[in-house]
Amino acid sequence: MATIQAGQEYGFFTDTSICIGCKACEVACKEWNQLQGDSPSFLADSFDNTGKLDAQNWRHVKFIEHVPDQSATTGNGAAWLMMSDVCKHCKHASCMEVCPTGAIIRTEFNTVFIQQDVCNGCRNCIAACPYGVIGMNQETGTAHKCTLCYDRLQGGLEPACAKACPTQSIQFGPLAELQKAADVRLAALHSQGASQAQLYGRDDKVYGGLNAFFLLMDKPETYGLPNEENAKLPSRNNIGGYAGAAVTAVLGVIAGLVAFRRRGMG
Amino acid sequence: MFLAAEHFVQSPEWLWYILFYFFFAGIAGGAYLVGTLLRLSGDARDEPAARIAFLVSLPATVICPILLTADLGASWWKFWHMLVNVTPGDTGLNFKYWSPMSVGAWALLVFGLFVAVSALDAWLGGRRGSGIIPTHVNRAFNIVGSILAIYIASYTGVLLSVSNQPIWSDTWVLGGLFLASGLTGSAALIALVIRNRPEASVSLGRLHQADGYFSVLELALIIAFFITVAAAGTLGRVLPWLPLWAIAVAGVAGSLIEARGHMRVQSAGSSGAAAGARLDTLVVPLLVLLGVLALRAAVIFSAQ
């Protein structure tokens, strides 16, 4: 890959059609970022033993296990879906929109980064993130998520997860190049008859476009991703919320004035 | 724009500190507004009750930043980052008009100043017979303070809506609902305090009457809340918390019953004074306050 340069847009293209669920990305992420991980938990009915993205899991391999009860015929089985999930580094980021401290910034690589020394742990970003990406670290009292290996990028290195991925399901690079590669891959899958394959976040219909976008083998909701119709910023509710409060305020003031009106007029 | 519910979010774990912050913010804002309305619409006999309202508003306001700071956990010492951006190369004041939390932090600071001045004026007025601020100036001051009070009592609901959480982001009602509920609770609390203040007891009936009106508003918004959440398809998340909603509605009902009784007494004239006194129970104001808390708990916990 060419030299990583500040001022250029970088991101991930995650091709879920070739993810094998090995979790090398999770391990590499934890190792580089010195994340201890959560206490092991038994999730009972899944090969997914991470559960979700949080302060200790900045990569999470989702297992969507649509396994039929009866054996499928060769080549016609309902396959597991696997997806290495991560912060989407949205162009229009909900977390960044609501953050009151200015802790969440866009870096010189056009990625979304939480400054740990500025964040004060208010958790407004967690309430806002539509992907459930951000987690709270109780020890530091701050919000954590994937940094897209900001420190590695500054050192000219690709992110640890992409480096470790054995199938190139996770590809890192300049966004424009990744988008071209994704278009080629989608066309190839469609030509092979995989008509359900679709790109998510490749264009600007989801949060203005995602720096970490995906090739999915089912509809976004199946992977726990809001579809285009539902991918909206929190600020959409400002007008409705304040209008409701304003109308209530007017009625409340009128009610008070009527109740407390001077006795001579009462 | 409110959307058909589809949420893949994580909980911000805004729990007990935030619940009580929402409660006290509602009481603080509501009490200040009630005090102002008493001063604007009542007569000289209502001044003691108005002073009590401003004095009630002070401790409720003081406790708010303490709760918010405690909620930050290990980062509590960075509470001031709400107001000041310390990002290297981008330092300055933080103010995002599109982020209710950002506006709320500033509003709480400025409202605190208004409450402190009004409470001091009320305290001195109670001791000396007149406050430190000339009447007309004071009224203008109270009106400006009331705008902030309305914001403090309501923005917490808007803050919840300006998210991507289930329930919270599925309805436009929360800001108004928290305001109406704050008004109801503060009127009940002031009535409770007035019970031991003979000089202010003349305003008691009208306070209950106002509480009744506020309760009607609150009840209408509770109904609107359930309709909007049902339309969004997330009503199922609300159902486990119905006992809390029942307490909230019981508070509304108690307030309405008490208000109706006082309105009957008023229409009966001075002969109804004794009957009015019988209506002033401890139970109803306490039930109303419990309802205010329960309503916020039901809203907060149903999404998390």
Image (tube, helix red, strand yellow):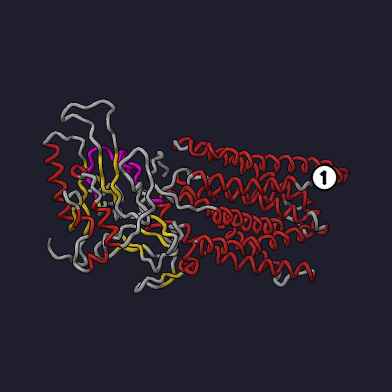
Amino acid identity at mark 1: Gly
Q: Residue at x 63, y 65 (%)?
A: B115
> Viewer-proximal residue, A10 or A205?
A10
The question of residue A224 being in magenta is answered with yes
Q: Residue A96 vs residue A261: left or right?
A: left
Q: Residue at x 65, y 69 (%)?
A: B117
Q: Is residue A34 above or below residue A178?
A: below
Q: Residue at x 79, y 40 (%)?
A: B264
Q: Which residue is mark 1?
A: B276
> Viewer-proximal residue, B158 or A258?
B158
The chain carrying label 1 is B
Q: Residue at x 19, y 61 (%)?
A: A158
Pinpoint residue B127: horizontal percent, then vertical percent.
79, 69
The local secondary structure at tag 1 comes to helix
Q: Quadrant of residue A37?
A: bottom left
Answer whether residue A94 is visible to the viewer in this image: no
Residue placed furthest toward the right: B271
Q: Residue B241 vs residue A210: left or right?
A: right
Q: Which residues are magenta?
A: A213-234
Pinpoint residue B133: horizontal percent, then vertical percent.
70, 71
**Mark 1: few/some/many CA within 10 Å (<14, 14-19, 20+):** some
